[in-house]
Amino acid sequence: MAEKVGEQNALLAYQCCLKAISDIEKVFKKVRTNPDFQRVPSVFYASNKTGQQIIEKEYEIRKKHGLPVTLLSDKEIKKKFGFEAPCALMNEKSAQIDAYKASVTLLDYHMLKHKLKIYTHTQVTACKKKNSGFELSTDRGHKITCKHVVIAAGFEAGQFLPEIVMKLTSTYAIISEPVAPEYLWEGRSLIWETKDPYIYIRTTQNNRIIVGGEDEEFQDPVKRDDLLRDKISRLEKKFRKLFPSIPFKTDMAWCGTFSSTEDGLPYIGEWPGKTGMHFALGYGGNGITFSMNAAQMIRNTITGKEDERYKVFGFERMKI
């Protein structure tokens, strides 16, 4: 990232995501419901010799800036986690969460606490700029007037953007039947690799294992779904090669589409010249932490506070 956006901007982006983990934790302590938020280490391992060079280079720049990182040798990886790799980076400030449960928890909280109204199965078909703000039209014939609009619709937000700012990727995932806890590796770490396409692995509170990856360039939903059976087989083989002693049996599988950007960072804030229309687009694969940053940044803009994060997450960087 330092090579793409500059070292200081890359550092700021990393620090913002790191802080967002703690901010997310505070939110759910405030609402007194835990949507499976859990502090777990993150392990980024070298898939091969090329990956080893990536890991060693990454370790040096993170260490230089005082970021939380430990370089693990092949022997340490084998002892701690039970799989073989030349080396790995471990970050003990990471966390995992059930994103769906978290979203529903927050919506329920604000419906009860602040009388939030939610209109499901309602599409916004038009958004027109007015002198006092915006007028939105819905597919049910209603009009909504407001001073500010926040668009947080993922890759479907494209209809509101003057230019294409992301590319679409299909990703695949499988989840195991519950396994005995003694089969799970130390710390139940989040695990991912340097190879592209990579796999990522995490556990759940009821001792299931989620394995995802095998990403493909998105073409259309039919072709994406047709690949699912083959992708299940590939993900199973990769996991069993890594952890041959774990009795992994796929219980469910799914696929979906996500957006990514050229620099791996999200797009947050107002499009230049479109004051009052705010985008919260957590593109790049770190949508949970990016979303926390988006909430804070957009709140600051609406309340008139400056925010340095726009220089790394805002649309203005498209000019660079």
Image: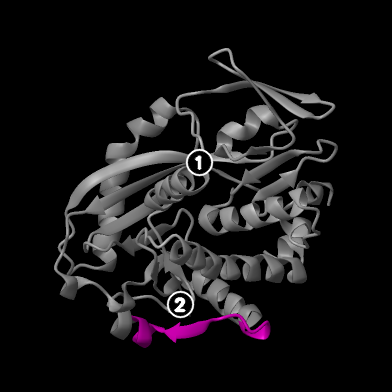
- In the rendered view, would you say 51 is above or below 214? below
Q: Secondary structure at mark 1?
A: loop
The amino acid type of the residue labelled 1 equals Lys
The amino acid type of the residue labelled 2 equals Ala
Q: Is residue 264 visible?
A: no
Out of 230 and 291, give the one closest to the viewer: 291
Residue span colored magenta: 63-77
- In the rendered view, would you say 299 is above or below 26? above
Q: Is residue 271 visible?
A: yes
Q: Residue at x 47, y 64 (%)?
A: 30
Tell me how far mark 2 sits from mark 1, CA to CA.
47 Å
Which labelled disc corresponds to residue 88?
Answer: 2
Q: Secondary structure at mark 2?
A: strand
Dot 1: within a 10 Å radius of its alpha carbon, few (fewer than 14), some, or many (20 or more) residues?
few
Label whose residue precedes the other's in the sequence (2 or 1): 2
- In the rendered view, would you say 236 is above or below 45? above
Q: Does residue 225 show up magenta in the picture?
A: no
Q: Residue at x 17, y 75 (%)?
A: 182
192 sits to left or right of 133: left
Task: Report the quarter where the N terminus lies.
Answer: bottom right
294 sits to left or right of 253: right
Q: Residue at x 65, y 79 (%)?
A: 61
Please give the residue where the numbered disc 1 appears in the rendered image: 115
Residue 204: x percent and y percent?
28, 61
